[in-house]
Structures are given as structure tokens and as C-alpha cells.
Amino acid sequence: MIGFIKGKVHAIGPDQILLDHDGIGFRINFSRGERLKVDQEVTIYTYQNVREDEISLYGFLSLSEYDLFTKLITVKGLGPKIASSILAKASVDDILSAIATNDVDFIRKMPGIGAKTASQIILDLKGKLVDNSKVQESDELNEAREALKALGYKNNEFSNILKEVAKKEKSTDAMIKETLKLLAKK
């Protein structure tokens, strides 16, 4: 298996890149092409997918993306294309947070994911991706998230702010108050 490829980005397509490594062009399924530039030197961590009719590479800029991808494709009904599209739409932290807090609605918004598959992702991956201390921290975070939703805010309006606040504040009330202050400044 090819673990990673270092090279220069030769071309960027909507869902693939062509990476030049010592004169050999590797076509890699890569769903976040906006993060790259032509002629940029990069290291792409790869997953080699082998099927009866195709051998393909899926690429990621970080090991955390690669690790989450390999976990996602273990879920029944999730193949590499859908797992890659999930990582294209949300950050690793957002996906891990959604799994830790049982946020089925967030996962359902990913392309190709229905309610049943979203629940299956949480069921299959919660114990594998999140240790118990993170789950404890996430309970307060989840309560704050639900309170902000109840106040009429949409998840995409406050999610990043709340995560930053959660790094400093530990109680649910403190998280909510600080997030509301920062939202008011926007």
C-alpha cells in the first residue's frame, strides 16, 4: 500500500488532483482541491482502494483526515466516495464532535447520508474515536449547543465560536454566556 506521496501538484480537478512525483503522475481522489495550488510541493497521505474493476488512491493533507477516513469506511454502507465527500464538507473536529455528542442531525447533512446511516456512524465509531474524557467534556459542550439552538441560533452560526470558547470555559453556563457575547460582536 502507498502510505503517502510527496510531490508537486500538477493539476487540480473538482474531485481529483494530479501529483507529480519524480516525473510520475499520480491521479488521486482529493475532494478539497481549493486547499492546494498548482506547482505547490505537498505530502499527500493516501488510501489505496482496490475493487474488481478499479484501483484508486484517496488523498488527504493530514494524518487525522486519513485516520477518520479509514474509520468511516468501516461503517456498513459507507464507501470511500461517500467518506471522502463527508470530509470535504466538514472538518475532522466537527465530525468527531458530532459523533461524540450523538449529533445525528449534523451527520445527516453530509452528502449521501440519511438518518439510518448517520445513526450507524455514531453507533459504530463513538467508542473507537472518542475516549471517555472527551465524552465527559462533550456533555457540557452538547448542552451549550442545544441551548444555543433553542435560542434560535443555527449550528453553523455558532459552532466554531463555541468550540473555541469550550477550550477556556468548562461549565455549560459559562460557554453559553461567552459564546453569546462573541456572537453579539459579529
Image (spheres, rainbow, N blue to C red):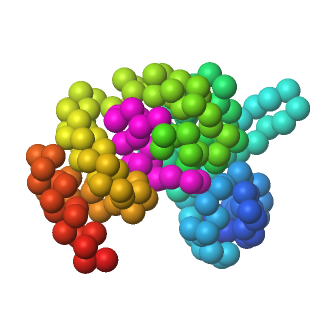
- Position in image of residue 178 (x %, y %): 16, 62
Among the 4 quarters of the image, the one containing residue 37: bottom right
Task: Identify which residue, 33 or 138, lies in the foreground.
Answer: 138
- Position in image of residue 86 (x %, y %): 58, 46
Task: Identify which residue, 27 or 84, lies in the foreground.
Answer: 84
- Position in image of residue 94 (x %, y %): 41, 49
Residue 8 as seen in the image, left or right of residue 103: right
Residue 146 as seen in the image, left or right of residue 68: left
In the depicted structure, whether residue 132 falls above or below residue 113:
above
Instruction: Report the residue at 35% width, 34% height from top.
Output: 100
In the depicted structure, whether residue 115 falls above or below residue 60:
above
In the depicted structure, whether residue 8 falls above or below residue 118:
below
Instruction: Report the residue at 26% width, 47% height from top.
Output: 147
* Quadrant including the N terminus: top right
Task: Identify which residue, 109 or 123, lies in the foreground.
Answer: 109
What are the residue bounds of the magenta stretch?
Answer: 88-104
* Quadrant including the C terminus: bottom left
- Observer able to see residue 169: no
Among the 4 quarters of the image, the one containing residue 7: bottom right
Among the 4 quarters of the image, the one containing residue 179: bottom left
Task: Identify which residue, 60 or 151, lies in the foreground.
Answer: 151
148 in magenta: no
Residue found at the very far right of the displayed protein = 53
Instruction: Report the residue at 48% width, 44% height from top.
Output: 106
In the depicted structure, whether residue 96 falls above or below residue 6:
above
Instruction: Report the residue at 56% width, 45% height from top.
Output: 109
Residue 5 as seen in the image, left or right of residue 23: left
- Observer able to see residue 11: yes
